[in-house]
Amino acid sequence: RSPNFLYRPPNCRHLQMLLKNYRLSDDIAFRFGNRGWAGWPLTVEKFADWVDQINGNGYVCNLFMDYETFGEHQWADTGIFDFLRSLPGAVLGSGKNDFLTVSEAVQQYEPVGDVDVPHMISWADTERDLSAWLGNSMQANALHDVYVLAEDVLASGDEGLIHDWRRLQTSDHFYYMCTKWFADGDVHKYFNPYESPYDAYINYMNILDSVRARAEAAMH
């Protein structure tokens, strides 16, 4: 399916879906500063031309990426901020394009079909699934153990305890435990404050033990 059209979920006629154009999004988010990439250097003129090619083959070009693309994934010395500053003018310059909010796109275009997504998906890694957070036994064990505490923690009525327990459910904790390609210095290692995923797991479980002890004390 082309990501350049609108779709709807099956059996849900009133909800419309906008899909990420992952190739063009990732050209900015991950490949922009890569001098080994065939498309380097990525100029606004080149990118605007790629966007123009969608005309006649789609309604929209959805560029979805994290805020950290600008200045973290792509540092200032790559020219990313100059690129971003000039991009709107270049895209509009052909006279073929405009910019729409999500609501405007939904009002202007009709879905061309249904898209069924029976499994969990994400933007992470090449698999685009949940394996960045639930791909190994450490992650599964940590997530299981924090959920097991739910009944006791909530029953305690201790707002501080409940707050700490909820913070332990932040997805970053489980992302730090990911072992996929860690030794290769990929993006998992780049954003990981720990020396290894195993250190992340040990630290997390130690903190979870403290929360468990506090919950048990509150019940007596």
Image: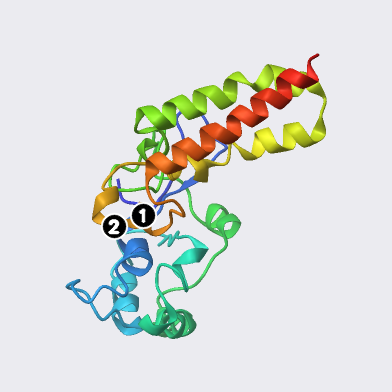
Q: Quadrant of residue 65?
A: bottom left
Q: How is the image coloured?
A: rainbow
Is 133 displayed left or right of 205 in the figure?
left
Name the image quarter holding the N terminus.
Answer: top left
**Residue type at tag 2:** Gly
**Residue at point 30%, 56% (across, down):** 186
Query: Could you classify mark 2 by the number of other residues whose Cα lies within 10 Å: few (under 14), some (14-19), or many (20 or more)?
Result: few
Q: Nearer the viewer, residue 18 or 176?
A: 176
Marks 2 and 1: in contact by CB < 8 Å?
Answer: yes
- Could you say which quadrant of the image residue 152 lies in? top right
Residue assigned mark 1: 189
Q: x%, y% of residue 110?
A: 48, 49
Farthest residue, direction top: 220
Residues at marks 1 and 2, CA–CA distance in whole angstroms: 5 Å
Q: Residues within 10 Å of mark 1 (few under 14, many from 20)?
A: many
Where's residue 98, x and y in %? 48, 73
- Asked if one can make out residue 207 in the rendered structure from this viewpoint, the answer is yes
Q: Is residue 149 above or below residue 130?
A: above
Give the left or right position of residue 189, taking residue 152 as reference: left
Vertical side of 157 occupied by 58: above or below: below
| Helix, strand or loop status at disc 1 | helix
> Pointer 2: what residue?
185
- The amino acid marked with disc number 1 is Lys
